Image (cartoon, helix red, strand yellow):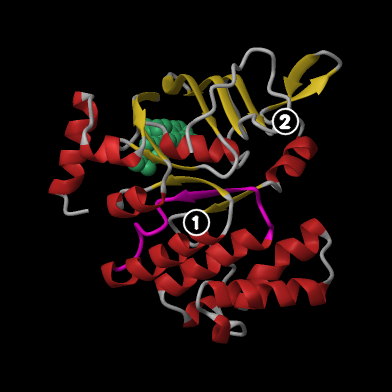
Amino acid sequence: MPPSETPLHDGPQGVEGQPLIVFDQVVKRFGDLTVLDHLDFQVDPGERVTLIGPSGSGKTTILRLLMTLEKVTEGHIWVDGEPFSHMSRGSALVPASESYLRAKRKRVGMVFQQFNLFPNMTVRQNITEAPIHVLGTPKDEANERAGELLDLVGLGEKIDAHPTQLSGGQQQRVAIARALAMQPEILLLDEVTSALDPELVAGVLDVLREIAETTDITMLCVTHEMGFARDVSHRVLMFDHGRIAEAGPPDQIFGDPQEERTKSFLRSVLDNGD
Ligand SMILES: Nc1ncnc2c1ncn2[C@@H]1O[C@H](COP(=O)(O)OP(=O)(O)OP(=O)(O)O)[C@@H](O)[C@H]1O
């Protein structure tokens, strides 16, 4: 799916043919450190985008902004034509309030490197907690959906287990099911296999491949798993110092990169055996 050519300037309107996510001149600073530097990019509905680039180039910060865990320093983020980092007040955009962000956050699911499951809850409770308490889903319906999602990630028989009884790969598959239980339009994946023993990586990637193939969820994925990125993404963005150094379909970025920074980054990843 090609990236949308829709211009940014009239304010995206959330109609068919418009991008789902727009970063418009986004700057993110932590103190004196500029992590994202007037960043512009767009993601279409259903598009799967992989973010690659050296450590510290700002990839995780992009996901955290979309999860509303960070706030932009300058610029704007739009989702489905509506302000995401800000909210409208009359004709002006003002910084978003916590309640506004909480409502927006429901559209986005994130899976982290560390699985972050609640250790005192069963697998079922981990998955149904947010749908019941945030979305108001009836308990029976949430339980039924938890069972379906656990089947999808191949863990149907673990519904009453506790996270400590599961391997890292199984915990991460539960974390994927938990993110999907909120029925997000956007799924953010941040190095989801980095904390796993090598033999557990393939099982998690297979689950994500299946989700990519069988749903139209929009995915933004930070990963060093280049084979996976090549298989599932429509587009790869190579970041360097908070800007996009190169962007294109995976065959081009991995097979025929144009920028020296992309070439040296890919060489370093391959040298590390990833
Ligand atoms: N809360 C924070 N406070 C201060 N500095 C931060 C904070 N979060 C991130 N940074 C800094 O911002 C820079 C970009 O971090 P980010 O995690 O987005 O990079 P990354 O490209 O995802 O790197 P990696 O591949 O190592 O995860 C880093 O220098 C990091 O130390």
User: Is 274 situated above or below 5?
Assistant: below
Give the number of marks.
Answer: 2
**Between discs 1 and 2, the one toward the N terminus:** 2
Q: Quadrant of ligand 1?
A: top left
Q: Secondary structure at mark 1?
A: helix
- Name the quadrant containing residue 139: bottom right
Q: Residue 152: percent from the left, percent from the top?
A: 55, 72
Three-letter residue code for mark 2? Gly
The magenta stretch spans residue 109? no
Q: Left or right of 241: which side holds 109?
A: right
Between 127 and 153, the one lying in front of the other is 153
- Assess disc 1: are there few (<14), some (14-19) or many (≥20) residues with their C-alpha within 10 Å of its C-alpha: some
Q: Main secondary structure of the magenta part?
A: loop
Q: Which residues are magenta?
A: 182-197
- Kindly tell me whether mark 2's CB lies below 8 Å from ligand 1: no
- Kindly tell me whether mark 1's CB lies below 8 Å from ligand 1: no
**Location of mark 2 (residue):** 14
Cβ atoms at labels 1 and 2 below 8 Å apart: no
Three-letter residue code for mark 1? Ala
State the residue at coordinates (60%, 40%).
45
Q: Residue 63: percent from the left, percent from the top?
A: 51, 40
Residue 140 in view in this figure:
yes
**Location of mark 1 (residue):** 212
**View extreme (left): residue:** 271
